[in-house]
Amino acid sequence: MNNIEKKLLEKIVDLHSTPSGAFSIRKNGVLQDKSSTKEIEIIPKKNKSGIDIKIKSGTQNKSVHIPVIITIGGLNDIVYNDFYIGENCNVVIVAGCGIHNDTCNSSSHNGIHRFYVGVNSHIKYIEKHVAEGKGSGEKILNPVTKVYLKENSTMEIETLQIEGVTSSVRKTQAILNNNSILKIRENVLTDKNQTCKTIFDVKLNGYKSSVDVISHSVAKNKSYQEFKSILYGNNECFGHVECDGIVLDNAQIISTPMVCAKNSNASLVHEAAIGKIAGEELVKLMSLGLNKEEAENIIIEGFLLG
């Protein structure tokens, strides 16, 4: 790989070289390299673009990396990745996409990921999206995450979109079974004329299932963000969604909650707080010798990454 590709990999999955263990690297719409282990098998799909990741029951303290990089213009990449996780597993999955586009033609990546999580398994899924390049071509990322949790399973999702993405529509759908737990932490930054729309659709079907969603967003310049969440409480369950946003310049953030309780023992909560950076925070940092932009950047970084 050249230096641009290496830097993209470092940004999205913190890799400086080929990872140990199971991995799949996709570059410019083509599977570039992959490796399986005895616990985690990666199989290219035969009828469409993508891979099947099969994790054997009992797999403990393992990880798998599946980054995607795009370094050309005019590419509309669509990939379907399915994760089949057995019982009693504890695995970290690291994904994400980086686009470097120096052309006047748009490049996009649409990743559709489905997770079938077995009984008593715990999965942590980390997904980072970044975009860069001097060209006028758009850099578009539209991730779709579908989660199916069996009894007593847990999934933690950490998503981060921090640089240069022209537009994105981020969809997460989940169906939870008895005593299953879903935790989501989303962090999004938009700037210039960028747009981002986030949609969460969670069905709490299982007895004492629970979901906790926390979204932190920062909109700068003339960018636009929209956050929508829909929780269905179909059993005795608990659901919590928190959307916190910082608006700067002439940007906009819209938050639209919806909760639907179909069981008298369903407890569903939505919180939203959108505003500007507190003046006293800026004053405190600027008193240390920072200018306003530097102070704002420190506050934003702490808000998104802290």
Image (cartoon, grey):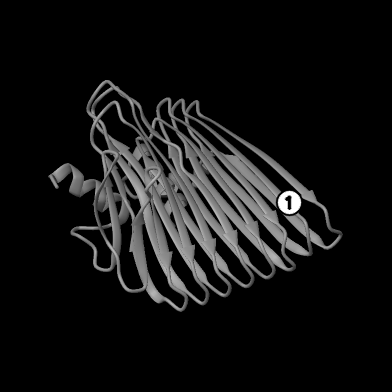
Residue found 47% across the figure and 56% down from its top: 158
Q: Is residue 233 above or below residue 250?
A: below
Q: 33 or 211, which is in the foreground?
A: 33
Q: Who's the residue at 51% across and 43% down the image? A: 217
**SS at circle 1:** strand
Query: Relative to 132, is 47 on the left or the right?
Result: right
- Residue lying farthest right? 264
Q: Quadrant of residue 74?
A: top left
State the residue in front, 234 or 87. Answer: 87
Foreground of the two, 20 or 267: 20
**Image vertical order of residue 105 relative to residue 40, above or below:** above
The quadrant holding residue 132 is top left
Compare residues 132 and 192 and report the one nearer the observer.
Answer: 132
Tell me which amino acid carries mark 1.
Answer: Tyr
* Residue in view at x 25 percent, y 25 percent: 135
The extreme left residue here reads 2
Residue 22 in sight here: yes
Query: How many marks overall?
Result: 1
Q: Residue 119: percent from the left, percent from the top?
A: 58, 72
Q: Residue at x 87, y 59 (%)?
A: 264
Tell me if I can see residue 287 in this picture: no
Q: Which quadrant of the rendered structure holds the C terminus?
A: bottom left
Q: Residue furthest front?
A: 46
Residue annotated with mark 1: 232
Q: Indicate the position of residue 198 as horizontal and vertical percent values.
A: 55, 40
Residue 15: percent from left, percent from top:
24, 58
147 displayed left or right of 167: right
Spot occupied by residue 51 in the image (x, y as percentages of width and height): 38, 52
| Crowd around label 1: few <14 · some 14–19 · many ≥20 (10 Å) | many
